Image (cartoon, rainbow, N blue to C red):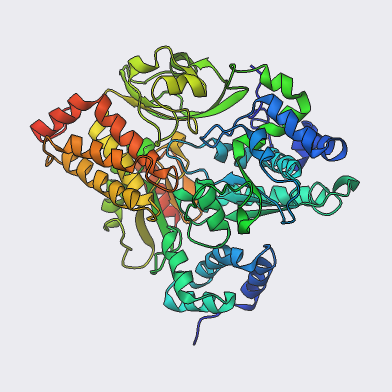
Amino acid sequence: MEKILLRNIYVPDSHTLAVYRSHNGYQSWEKVIKGLRPEQLIEEIKASGLRGRGGAGFPTGMKWGFVPKDSPKPKYMVCNADESEPGTFKDRLLIERDPHAIIEGTLIAAYAIQSHTAFIYIRGELAFGAGVLERAVDEAILAGYIGKNILESGYDLDLIVHRGAGAYICGEETALLSSLEGGRGWPKLKPPFPATHGLFGCPTVVNNVETLAALPWIIEKGAAAYAAMGTEKSKGTKLFSVSGHIRYPGVYEVEMGYPFMKFLQEDCGGVPNGRKLKGVIPGGASMPVLRPEEIENVKLDYESVQAAGSLLGSGGVIVMDETTCMVRAAWNIARFFAHESCGQCSPCREGCHWMEKIFQRIEQGEGDEDDLDLILNVSGNIMGNTICPFGDAAAMPAAAFIKKYREEFEAHIAQKRCTVIS
Amino acid sequence: MALEFSPETYKKFEAMMNRYPKKEAALLPVLCLAQQEFGHLGQEAIEYVARLMDQPPARVCGVVSFYTMLNTKPIGRHHIQVCRTLSCALRGAEQLTGFLKKTLGIEVGQTTAEGRFTLSEVECLASCGTAPMMQINDDYYENLTNEKVTEILASLK
């Protein structure tokens, strides 16, 4: 399979402009800014079938199309580099090894919506990556790809690298915009959507790093070439971050529709130490865990993973072998969400902490038999009752762990200790 | 003496204020700058930034308390942050924290007596494929073992 997103990362000095340019870098930007009208560009990306890689899988071209063309307000383009979903580290790889692909993609997207100010919002902890991006932006400014009258096209565009300061929720697009406005990272009610009321109340598009990094290739090779890869509804390739009990952890690029089990066993080397697979989270900690028998015929695309009862999400694949205490794993994830809830909506603010406490007491041998239904009840009361998808992201995995490994939870409660780890 | 930016830092501050379509957008970078300059963001630093940015101190305080990287209390020269989230936990993060506690003689959330190390547990740092890991100040240390941690600690003065 031809690599689209990881095509440059193994080239020495892939983060520099010189190397990027020697691999056709910025030719797509030049093609777009000199020869395509914004409407043509949007149609091209719609035709490619590219969907948002941050987790939601929303069609990228359609998202751009929602930005009003006649608005008198400035328009903003934002690259979401706030990668924080547990089990996900693909964007970090692109940021550190192929920053110019992200920058070029951001410029292309900005042009599509006719934005003259773009941002890359990078999570604060990624100090090294932010430095790489900042130096790459400086190089691109000097080369004339960013700034006034870019490549004598008459088009002006600024790009600002903005660092966060530690908050998972800022990966949610409206929270990111609140943070970028200088506030707490609080999500906002949708509608109105950022496309009409985003940054400072102006039309704004937020796209994930991986989504944007695919754009230069799509422009270079054409929408049809991209759409020829993948499945009917999930086009192109996708990055998967694989971690946990797996022989070769890392970031993999696979064509959408690739068999999940084959991917784990062959590409990633399977579960090491002769142990058996116990469960897999396919799309980052927000997504329901799947048992081995549930992934047997699953393919790595949005529809297939959803049909199996989970979601592809960010492609953060967390593998757990037979030595994993699922009570402890569920508690770990519940603790994450309790720590990261922004506190705006009561069901999430209260519910996440309750779920964490109940999982903790079960783990510590102090749970009782009603606790499992209590967690399911709390989880059910969070689902769909919050401003942003964080509530669902906390509720779904908690319920899934209990439903799928109930016998282990019950044994843990009855024996007042872990029955997996002796 | 009241807290204030050094002339060089003040120049950086002014550049930040001019970078954004609206100046309030500079608050987060300015707070990070202030933390670099003052070590942590106590009440005096918060009030100073609020004055500089023409914002109510309560609002600035609300922003500071929201973000985990902004410290309202003094921390050690080397802030050790061990990732505790699932992928790292599956590969020995808890053992790593235990080793650090024992080696440094402190609990999570504490600073060593001479002010050299502060130990914290944090949530996912996007380094799951190289677990277990820790961040010390700006740097990531990955695929950790007790031996590696011992060497790293010895190299930090």
Picture quarter with the C terminus of chain B: bottom left
Give the side of residue A408 with respect to residue A132, left or right. left
Q: Residue at x 38, y 23 (%)?
A: A309
Q: Position of residue B107 (x, y in %)?
A: 26, 57
Q: Is residue B78 above or below residue A282?
A: below
Q: Quadrant of residue A294?
A: top left
Residue at horizontal 54 percent and vertical 17 percent from the top: A257
Is residue B90 in sight in this rendering?
no
Q: Residue at x 48, y 56 (%)?
A: A185
Residue found farthest to the bottom = B1
In the rendered structure, the answer to whether residue A308 lies left or right of residue A335 reads: right
Work out whether B149 lies above or below A319: below
From this view, report whether residue B13 is shown above or below residue A336.
below
The number of callouts visible is 0
Give the camera-side residue of A197 and B143. Answer: A197
Is A136 positioned to the left or the right of A320 in the image?
right
Measured as percent of width and height from the top left, residue A166 is found at 47, 54
Q: Nearer the viewer, residue A319 or A227?
A: A227
Q: Answer with the quarter of the image where residue A182 lies.
A: bottom right
Q: Is residue A157 left or right of residue A53?
A: right
User: Closest to the observer: B28 or A77?
Assistant: A77
Residue A226 showing in the rendered view? yes
In the image, farthest residue toward the left: A415
Residue A333 in picture, x, y percent from top left: 33, 40
